[in-house]
């Protein structure tokens, strides 16, 4: 056989499997891809060509026509780089290959909880791991009752259904008598959820709904787009792929002006901006107020709309004009706060008033995740209202999560004949909010463990109605014990939530007697677990999924296994099945169904079961759901409310947009941190993270911590092909790859920092090391570090080599009664790190092995 | 011989082209057509960052 013939024969063994590579974790997938496998190995990852097995006529291709130009979806999925390079994540040196036990955790003797994050791990057998887990659950139940077991089963991860990355254990814990639940606060929507929701009642998270046909509406009607704290070249990647990029190019071709308002020339601004207005982190509320001031004093707002569609404008006007506090919110006043010259604010106000303007968001970032984020969240909506929000071309437009929350009203692209949903019944893990008797919001877990009892408002679950924000909760709940055991799956609390260092202190509390984690990779919170169980990736599982997020064509597919599980790993569902079996509850837990049967349930309840047979979708590997023939009939955004507010009331007490929130006035009349009319609040009882506060003398810079460009929150940190990109990692002189810290040349020069230097970023909550990226893409006085970097403790809870910004983010919730978190827009100082001194002082941490191109790996923490 | 045709006016800097190349050639031996590519270091996409005029312009306060 010649070499050529041999290659051809091998090529014949290739097989292509359709698989989703979205990384939200909750229910619905995205980034549908084609995975080529051969000889039990992944060869390559490709976009899926929608027309691979179908004639495009079968799925009714759509197109936008506006201003003489045409926009069409591509015939292939627009997957992002971390989906394309995901093979490296599957085969990462960081994979947990077998069950691990912390070497000095002895459940029958000294548990050495203070050594969590310090001590290493050893391999144990599955039998030993399961015996330990079952005996610990029984012990905790006996000593404290079932509510002492705390389920952390949320956050971001691979998106799976039957083998759900989050929450498979919840049903078993229910069968065992109950548990306490970590309720995930709306982490990328904080300002909208806790603020804007009180202005216009938008469910579920306070952003504008509906979104229908708004992508077309912009093309047809909008003259000015304000990308306010928006980076649609970054945040949508894990959910919606890269359609937002194509649309942004098209909008420019149509002549729609795009202004980017953010402290950094983010990745979208770098290629799409007509103008960048750099604004100091978390000062947007001041600029909003100055724009309102300009419109009010110049009479350039829609007075008729305000009279017919809104409530309480007079009180807002009083505050803006300074009648309440003797401070008129002039552009000159805002210029001092925001760093934006008054003439720019005036020009922006004039342009907004004279052009049909929409604001654009991609969630996250400094804008909506800072201290008092309720205020910019609310004020933007009020400005939109002053220019008649809902009229053609004037809306709040999403560039991310089209179709999220299983809601076709959230689809901004043409809807399909069916909005698919494969998880609402078949999902074996994460389920729609089901509060348990005792809950702790995710952003209060450290406080609950370290300083009980605590009280707060709102369960913080994303789907809750606004009324829940007026319900006071407490921990411990009546009849419940404090928590003493944590069962966590694919966690990344410390790198993605507020004040990770304090959470580390909580993890090391003697009250927490046992922590067990399930994770495909040994990273972040896993380093504080007593037992770590190896989880297979979705490449190693059969499942069912759909992609209604792409802004192209909605798809659904039964997913075959690409490769065998790595090492001894098992899916989260399989792991819980093994534990259920030891409790004699396997039949109840699985409801008597096999994995294959649950996958079939997913299909039969998906909504497409009458459009294609199971046999045909199995044979073809996927199905493209036809575009709805009447998609153009879907009303654009808020046009119904615009045209007739009385017949289409909003979910506020008045049914209108409330400049003065009647609910906040009723339930929190004395709350100066979230008053009924939104205010500029630089600092207060909860936070002092402002340049206007005395604390800025010690920490004179403001941190911008965006959602990461090269990963989804803490995911994808070990993809070597990404880490060699300069904006992904900066290699220090020690060979270690640090997260880049964007710092302006002026700030760098003042501190003797050169591009590529290892720097220490610190405040009173701790310090992280980063790699200096000296650039004019960040405004002076601010430093930008993407959050989510892989934690690598030098001193756990104090100093991190892995550049995890959230470890030093503010501790307290958004404001007194708003139970969100603040993870951006906080005070820091930066200095050049003395690596030699650090190495001398912390030899153990600096001698820890790491992969030169993938960072910390299994060997870093496990005695192999 | 393979070639990637890239419309640089549409480049958004996602590096998908370079990553697709690596995905095909790192760890995959396509001899006699192509030897495996080293996992890192073959960084052929030379994308520079030019600071656009609006950054150096009047809106930036130093």
Image: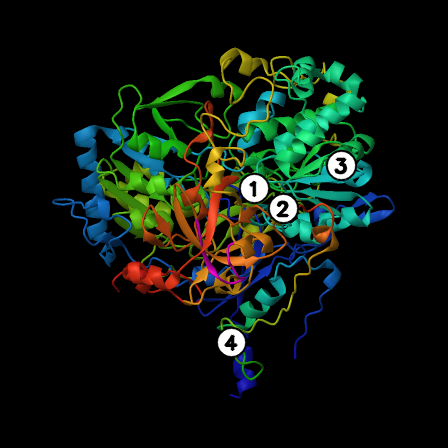
Classify the position of the C terminus of chain A by image quarter. bottom left
Q: Residues within 10 Å of mark 2 (few under 14, many from 20)?
A: many
| CA separation in Å, label 1 and label 4 | 47 Å
Q: Residues within 10 Å of mark 3 (few under 14, many from 20)?
A: few
- Circle 1 chain: A
Q: Reading the chain from its start, which is encountered first: label 1 or label 2?
A: 2
Q: Nearer the viewer, mark 3 or mark 4?
A: 3
Q: Can I make out residue A404 in this image?
A: yes
Main SS of the magenta segment?
Answer: loop
Disc 1 marks which residue?
A365
**Which is nearer the eye, A584 or A546?**
A546
| CA separation in Å, label 3 and label 4 | 67 Å
Q: Nearer the viewer, mark 2 or mark 4?
A: 2
Q: Where B20 falls versus A581 (above or below)?
A: below
Residue A231 disc label: 2
Q: Nearer the viewer, mark 2 or mark 3?
A: 3
Residue A759 shown in magenta = yes
Secondary structure of residue under mark 3:
helix
Q: Reading the chain from its start, which is encountered first: label 1 or label 4?
A: 4
Disc 3 marks which residue?
A343
Callouts 1 and 2 on one subunit: yes
Residue A80 shown in magenta = no
Kindly check if marks 3 and 1 are in contact, taking CB atoms under 8 A apart as contact: no
State the extent of the magenta-drawn residues as a range.
A751-761
Q: Where B4 falls versus A261 (above or below)?
A: below
Q: Which residue sits at x=78%, y=39%?
A: A224
Q: Reading the chain from its start, which is encountered first: label 3 or label 1?
A: 3
Q: Residues within 10 Å of mark 1 (few under 14, many from 20)?
A: many
- Circle 4 chain: A
Callouts 3 and 4 on one subunit: yes
């Amino acid at each position: 056989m010649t070499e050529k013939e041999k290659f051809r024969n091998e090529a014949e063994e290739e097989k292509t499997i359709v698989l989703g590579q979205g990384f939200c974790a909750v229910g619905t997938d995205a980034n549908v891809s084609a995975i080529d496998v051969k000889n039990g190995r992944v060869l390559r990852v490709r976009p899926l060509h929608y027309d691979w097995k179908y004639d495009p006529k079968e799925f009714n291709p759509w197109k936008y026509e506006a201003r003489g130009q045409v926009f069409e979806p591509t015939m292939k999925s627009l997957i992002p780089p971390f989906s394309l390079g995901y093979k490296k994540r599957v085969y990462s040196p960081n994979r947990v290959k077998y069950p691990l036990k912390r070497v000095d955790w002895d459940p029958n003797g000294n548990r050495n909880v203070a050594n969590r994050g310090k001590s290493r791990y050893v391999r144990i057998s599955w039998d030993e791991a399961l015996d330990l887990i079952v005996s610990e659950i029984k012990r905790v139940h006996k000593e404290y009752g079932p509510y002492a077991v705390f389920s952390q089963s949320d956050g971001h991860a691979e998106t799976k259904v039957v083998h759900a990355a989050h929450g498979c254990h919840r049903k078993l814990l229910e069968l065992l008598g109950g548990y306490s639940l970590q309720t995930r606060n709306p982490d990328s929507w904080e300002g909208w959820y806790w603020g804007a929701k009180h202005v216009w009642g938008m469910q579920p998270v306070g952003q504008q709904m509906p979104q229908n046909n708004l992508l077309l509406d912009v093309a047809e009607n909008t003259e000015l787009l304000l990308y306010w704290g928006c980076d649609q070249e970054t945040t949508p990647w894990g959910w919606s792929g890269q359609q937002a990029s194509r649309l942004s190019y098209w909008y420019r071709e149509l002549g729609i002006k795009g202004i980017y308002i953010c402290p950094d020339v983010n990745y979208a601004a770098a290629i799409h901006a007509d103008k960048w207005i750099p604004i100091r982190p978390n000062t947007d509320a001041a600029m909003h107020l100055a724009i309102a001031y300009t419109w009010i004093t110049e009479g350039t707002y829609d007075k008729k709309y305000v009279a017919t569609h809104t409530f309480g404008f007079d009180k807002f006007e009083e505050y803006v004009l300074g009648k309440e506090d003797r401070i008129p919110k002039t552009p000159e006043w805002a210029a001092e706060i925001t760093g934006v010259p008054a003439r720019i604010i005036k020009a922006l106000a004039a342009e907004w008033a004279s052009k049909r303007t929409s604001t654009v968001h991609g969630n996250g970032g400094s804008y909506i995740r800072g201290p008092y984020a309720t205020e910019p969240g609310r004020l933007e909506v009020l400005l939109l209202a002053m220019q008649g929000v809902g009229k053609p071309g004037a809306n709040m437009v999403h560039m991310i999560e089209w179709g999220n929350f299983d809601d076709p009203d959230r689809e901004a692209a043409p809807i399909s004949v069916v909005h698919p949903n494969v998880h609402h019944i078949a999902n074996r893990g994460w389920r729609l909010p089901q509060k348990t008797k005792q809950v702790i919001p995710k952003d209060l877990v450290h406080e609950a463990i370290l300083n009980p009892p605590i009280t707060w408002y709102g369960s913080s679950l994303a789907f809750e109605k606004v009324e829940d924000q007026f319900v006071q909760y407490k921990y411990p709940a009546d009849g419940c014990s404090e928590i003493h055991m944590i069962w966590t799956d694919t966690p990344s609390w410390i790198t993605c939530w507020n004040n990770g260092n304090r959470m580390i202190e909580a993890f090391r509390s003697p009250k927490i007697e046992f922590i067990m984690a399930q994770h495909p990779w040994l990273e972040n919170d896993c380093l504080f677990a007593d037992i770590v169980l190896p989880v297979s990736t979705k490449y190693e599982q059969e499942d069912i999924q759909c992609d209604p997020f792409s802004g192209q064509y909605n798809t659904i597919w039964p997913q075959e296994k690409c490769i065998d599980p790595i090492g001894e790993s098992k899916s989260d569902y399989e792991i819980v099945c093994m534990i259920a079996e030891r409790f004699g509850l396997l039949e109840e837990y699985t409801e008597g169904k096999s994995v294959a049967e649950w996958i079939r349930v997913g299909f039969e309840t998906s909504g497409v079961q009458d459009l294609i047979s199971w046999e045909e979708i199995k044979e073809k590997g996927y199905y493209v759901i036809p575009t709805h023939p009447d998609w153009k009939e879907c009303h654009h955004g808020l046009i119904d409310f615009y045209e007739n507010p009385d017949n289409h009331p909003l979910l506020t007490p008045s049914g209108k947009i409330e400049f003065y929130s009647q609910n906040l006035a009723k339930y929190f009349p004395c709350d100066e941190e979230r008053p009924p009319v939104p205010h500029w609040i630089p600092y207060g009882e909860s936070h002092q993270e402002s340049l206007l506060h005395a604390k800025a003398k010690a920490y004179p810079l403001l941190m911008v911590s965006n959602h990461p460009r090269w990963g989804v929150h803490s995911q994808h940190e070990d993809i070597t092909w990404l880490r060699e990109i300069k904006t992904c990692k900066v290699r220090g002189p020690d060979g270690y790859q640090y997260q880049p810290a964007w710092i302006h040349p002026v700030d760098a020069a003042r501190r003797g920092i050169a591009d590529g230097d290892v720097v220490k970023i610190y405040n009173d909550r701790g310090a992280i090391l980063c790699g200096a990226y000296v650039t004019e893409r960040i405004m002076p006085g601010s430093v930008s570090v993407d959050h989510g970097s892989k934690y690598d403790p030098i001193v756990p809870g104090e100093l991190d080599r892995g550049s995890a910004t959230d470890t030093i983010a503010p501790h307290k919730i958004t404001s007194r009664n708003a139970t969100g978190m603040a993870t951006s827009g906080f005070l820091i100082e930066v200095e050049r790190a003395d690596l030699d001194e650090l190495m001398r002082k912390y030899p153990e941490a600096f001698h820890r092995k790491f992969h030169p191109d993938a960072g910390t790996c299994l060997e870093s923490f496990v005695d192999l | 011989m393979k070639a990637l045709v890239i419309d640089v006016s549409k480049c958004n800097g996602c590096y998908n082209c370079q990553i697709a190349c690596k995905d095909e050639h790192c760890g995959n031996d396509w001899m006699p057509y192509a030897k495996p590519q080293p996992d890192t270091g073959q960084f052929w996409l030379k994308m520079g960052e030019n600071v656009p005029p609006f950054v150096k312009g009047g809106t930036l306060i130093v």
